[in-house]
Image (cartoon, rainbow, N blue to C red):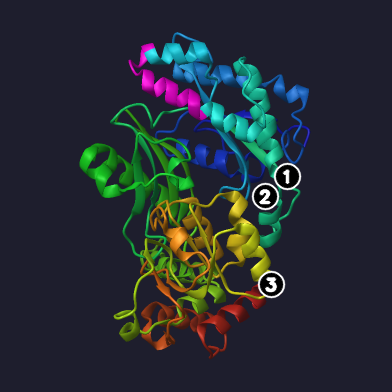
Amino acid sequence: MSDTPSILVLDAEVAADRELIGGKAWSIQRMMALGLPVPPAFVITTRAGGTDPVLPAEVWDGVPTAVAALEARTGRRFGAGPRPLLVSVRSGAATSMPGMMDTVLDLGITDEVERVLAQQESAADFAADTHRRFREQFEKVAGTPPPADPWEQLRRAIAAVLGSWNSPRAISYRESRGLSHDGGTAVTVQAMVFGNLDDRSGTGVLFTRNPLTGGAEPYGEWLPRGQGEDVVSGRCDARPLTDLETTLPQVHTDLLAAAAQLEADGADVQDIEFTVESGVLWLLQSRAAKRSPEAVVRHAVLLAREGLISESQALDRVSPENVRTLLSPHLDPAETATAPVLATGKPACPGLAAGVVVTDTGEALERADRGEAVILARPTTDPDDVAAMAVAVAVITELGGSTSHAAVVCRELAVPCVVGCGAGTLATLDGRAATVDAAAGTVYPGELTIVPATAADDPDIALLTRWARAESPDGAPGPLPELLRRRKMEKMR
């Protein structure tokens, strides 16, 4: 381990292990190797970071050299004019923990840098907005107002991001999924690109295939003049990717081409974060997408049919729980045709659930602990809500889109979710009994009649069943969930 580097400058030649550099940096080096447009970055490895919130002095001593590499590649100078370099500081565990640890964007900005940016870009509003965003995020993550010295900003931000590995929400997340607390996090420092710069700038998230329904079409959202967490936080209502196609058609074309390349390379559906700065596309991260149980099944079959994965690999990707959820019941259409509607929003994770609507996370945890079926309703969710989301039978938000925090986490948890129901929705729902049809994005009053589904209705289930039986030496009979369970047990022996 003594020969393992503490800091790595990422480039197309770097091929470090995910356990050493974390998922974020691993994604960056992968995209660089494919020749895709990625802002330059370096990573403080898990060897240096790990689980200790205190950055060793010998590691910090190597940071200026790594920053100099970013300066050389961008032609900018960190935290100083006439062409200032600002950076993001992001956590990066080996296993994806979406939204559980901390990030600081726009680091390196000061009063003087704000003045330089305002003159340089002829956009005083952009410079002021960037400074405001930095101050708010730094104080939230580091717990103190940002110092005037950019290097001290960087040191404190790295320490805060390291410390977020041991935050209560991160610990709770790992415990709920049986993940080890020992791996620690790497810290990725990357040159900023600005989605909030002008009218030809923005930020977005693209899934190479639909993560809700399992369809083959790309799916995502785009927020003009947005930055960083604006889309995933759910605080802003993002626009469909068709809006990007209309306003910046070449960027849209380039984005879909990069998405196809990343999916083929990863042999899996990708979740891609991107920024557009003055009409130029930049990719920030690509990872295997979190999907609804239905999408897991549909995509496994699609990818196998297209030859990206084998039939055996398709079976590996589908769990018995995925299949059971896909074959779950649906509402009686005759009843929904006449039932009043309490709220409508965007489908974020399909499924049905009935319970009482609760708007306070603490109350939701208490009532769920007593055995009540709780529907958690929030203006928008953040990592502090995850514990309540995990015990809720469904989640509803007033704000946000299908790539918001609520949507992404609920797909991983397989919790039915409807987002973007509109401001004021909570006031009309709080305390009411309701039924959530998350596939339709609809909330009904009371408990509606549910009609059971059957496996014979689904061709993908039938195909996976044939593959599972063909792979078994004795052509074992039984439904697909049982075949997958037995298959998993046999592989563990």
The percent position of residue 415, horizontal first and vertical second, equals: 52, 67
Quarter of the picture holding the N terminus: top right
Q: Three-letter amino acid code at disc 2?
A: Ala
Q: Are marks 3 and 2 in contact (CB under 8 Å)?
A: no
The percent position of residue 411, horizontal first and vertical second, equals: 50, 62
In magenta stretch: residue 237: no
Quarter of the picture holding the C terminus: bottom right
Which of the two discs, 3 and 2, sits closer to the camera?
2
Pointer 1 residue: 166
Residue at image position (49%, 29%) is: 133
Query: 214 or 402, which is in the foreground?
Result: 402
Give the residues drawn in magenta, as a range: 119-133
Q: CA distance from mark 1 to mark 2?
A: 6 Å
Q: Earlier in the sequence, mark 3 or mark 2?
A: 2
Element marked by disc 1: helix
Q: Is residue 386 above or below residue 492?
A: above
Residue most toward the bottom? 477
Residue at image position (34%, 19%) is: 123
Residue at image position (46%, 35%) is: 32
Image check: 338 left or right of 102?
A: left
Query: 312 or 232, which is in the foreground?
Result: 232
Q: Are marks 1 and 3 in contact (CB under 8 Å)?
A: no
Disc 2 residue crowd, few under 14, some 14–19, many 20+, Cα 10 Å: many
Pointer 2 residue: 170
Pointer 3 residue: 492
Quadrant of residue 458 within the rendered picture: bottom left
Q: Are marks 1 and 2 in contact (CB under 8 Å)?
A: yes
Query: 410 or 298, which is in the foreground?
Result: 410
